[in-house]
Amino acid sequence: MLDHRKEKLRGTRTGARRRRSRAGVRGLLLVAAVVTGALLALAGPGDGGYTSVAEADHPPSGPETLTAVAGPTAGSATLNWTAVDGAAGYRVHWISRADARANLADDAWLDLLGTADLGDAAQYTVTGLQPGADYYFIVGARQADDRIAWSKWDRLKLDSVEDHRRAVTRAYVTQAIEYYEAQGREAAVEFYRTAASAENGRTLILIDTTENTLLVYRNIPALQGQYVGPGSRYAGLTRLAQSATEEGLWGTSQGINPVTKQEEPRRVLAVLHDGLVFSSSHSALVGDVAASVQEYVSKATARYDQDGLDAVIAHYNSEASVEGQLYLFLIGADDLYLAHPIFPHLIDTDIKEVVGSDGQELGKEIALATEDGIWVEYLWPHPVSRREMQKVTWAIRHDGLIFASGYYAGAPEAGEPAWQGADPREYTVQYVHEAVERYEREGLDSFLNYYNSVASFEGQWYLFATDADDIYHVHPLIPELIGTDIKDVVGSDGYELGKELAKAVDGGEGVWVEYLWPHPVTLKEVPKVGYAVRRGGLLFASGYYPQVEDPAARTKEYVEQAIEYYQANGLDAAVAHYNSQESLDGQWSLTLADENDIVRVAILAPQLIGTDLKNVGVGRLRQIGQEMAAATEEGRWVSFIFPNTRSSETLYAHVWAIRYDGLLFTSRYYDDQPDVPSTPE
């Protein structure tokens, strides 16, 4: 546990871990001398009995055995004990050996005991402990008259975070080998390509070393079946296959976190078994994450001192500034956001107005940053998974500005996002009605805080809402609309979409409206379907972009049309046309490179024009540019993660790349699926 959080843990016990009243420990106080003597003898309370104050009354015995073992996560311990007949419940206490030894005077260690009051289960997992520390545990059987009979103490030294992670990773790989031995190769490949095979943020990489073929790589399904032997463009996978041993070899490399989908340093275990490499990994973020965050922020202030404000704003608003889960948000002297690479729509808004989904005024807390720096803890969506997690942020004032970054504590909720694969029309209704329920449950202020925050985004869904006079009060994507009348919103085709949405009747079933709206990637207008209801006079609305029936086929068709345009009009005309807005068709645009892979067309990323396409992604896990440039006249698909900063939505981009006349023509479509369905390369 980090030092800046340890005191908070000691001083506050919430939920199952709460501070006991003095009355509740009366029995413990009367035997404190016995325990203190054991501690002074350096034997710890685990070597001495710890029985009830009512020993003279001969209460029933406590649990005969108590065993503490490592828990399922770092900083946790699982306790198992012998059940006691007739027990009304159990009480568990725990304390670190360091805290016990340092607080013997006046029995002060008793106030530091963690506590959990339980039902009749004879097992409990204690969480929130300090990895690598020694702990004492005791359990008591509570009788109907509230007397408690205690077990003996048990002692456990917890694994460090890294030791625990390695043990879980090795167990996962061992389990995969056992599955292969029991079910065979074909079944193992099929199972470990599915979401059901993922456990504790770990997925399997399986390589056939005889054929040098990647059999399983769930993080990037498009790579499955690829050659990864000597000379392969997937050098990292080649090294992995070559380094594996029968005992298992540990290494560190850049990899993709299967939960967050972000690149980060990963500890990789590679085991060679029966001609196959079984490999998995876990995050290798350093144990003292706080120090890494502070170093990251310090580099930002140094860059500011050297290059000036404009250069810093430009850099930290770019994807290049993001390092794993670390990114910088920069606040001006007037407390307005200057940089935020993950949620850029926050720029020019006041950080003091940012409120968490739980009502915490986290923006005001961050705005209190001093030149010495402060730590602030709050709930915040992970930049890729979009699930709220506990975030710990370091914020420091430097030359009047606030430089801040943070890390995410714990693991995000497991499983796919609720909206992924859902029927978009049904999910739109569900999202809107959940917003109504939140408003009715928590009130207007809490409702406004949440739905004007990034926490409210769910994939492509966000809420826009008005008051009874149809004035916008919620629009997290385009906050400039707040204070304006929705009835004044008119599409480029003249359709009065705002008036149509405002026709929703209070208490009615709601209205559906189809209209044109900018696509979140290309900003080219495409069909959108909106749904609006009125409750208590307020208008609640959201919407979705209908997908074409076969986006893969439409992508190929768009590229074929571009090739035909080139055939008919020549290269210069094709370059001019496809670098213009007229060439955009909804989410489809063209990227064109010449025979030397120099980019000639890139309307959505004009900074790439004149550069070598093969350099896109250099230094990262996936060298996307090289994969696209490897396309032949038969064409190929290249799929990769595309965090869309305009909508705070994480998408997958699916690029169709094909060579014609030496030129490389590519286009892409976006969805929430990791691969192109039923399209073998």
Image (cartoon, helix red, strand yellow):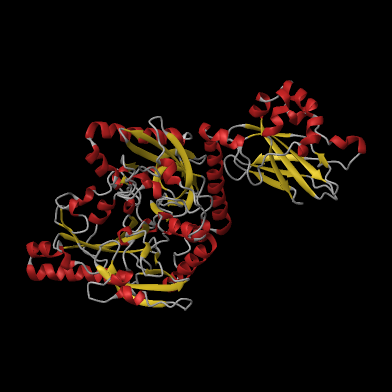
Residue 390 seen: yes
> In what quadrant of the picture does the N terminus appear?
top right
Q: Quadrant of residue 333?
A: top left
From this view, report whether residue 134 is shown above or below residue 322.
above
Residue at image position (34%, 61%) is 482
Q: Which percent across, then down, holds residue 473? A: 38, 62
Q: Which percent across, then down, holds residue 96? A: 65, 32
In this orientation, which residue lies closer to the viewer: 304 or 268? 304
Q: Quadrant of residue 539?
A: bottom left
Residue 219 seen: no
Q: Quadrant of residue 665?
A: bottom left
> In what quadrant of the picture does the C terminus appear?
bottom left
Task: Name the residue furthest front.
Answer: 469
Horizontal arrangement in the rendering, residue 508 relative to residue 25 (left or right):
left
Task: Name the residue furthest top.
Answer: 41
From this view, report whether residue 638 is shown above or below residue 265.
below
In this orientation, which residue lies closer to the viewer: 135 or 456? 456
From this view, report whether residue 89 is shown above or below residue 158.
below
Q: Which percent across, then down, holds residue 632? A: 22, 60
Horizontal arrangement in the rendering, residue 588 relative to residue 189 (left or right):
left
Task: Name the residue furthest right.
Answer: 57
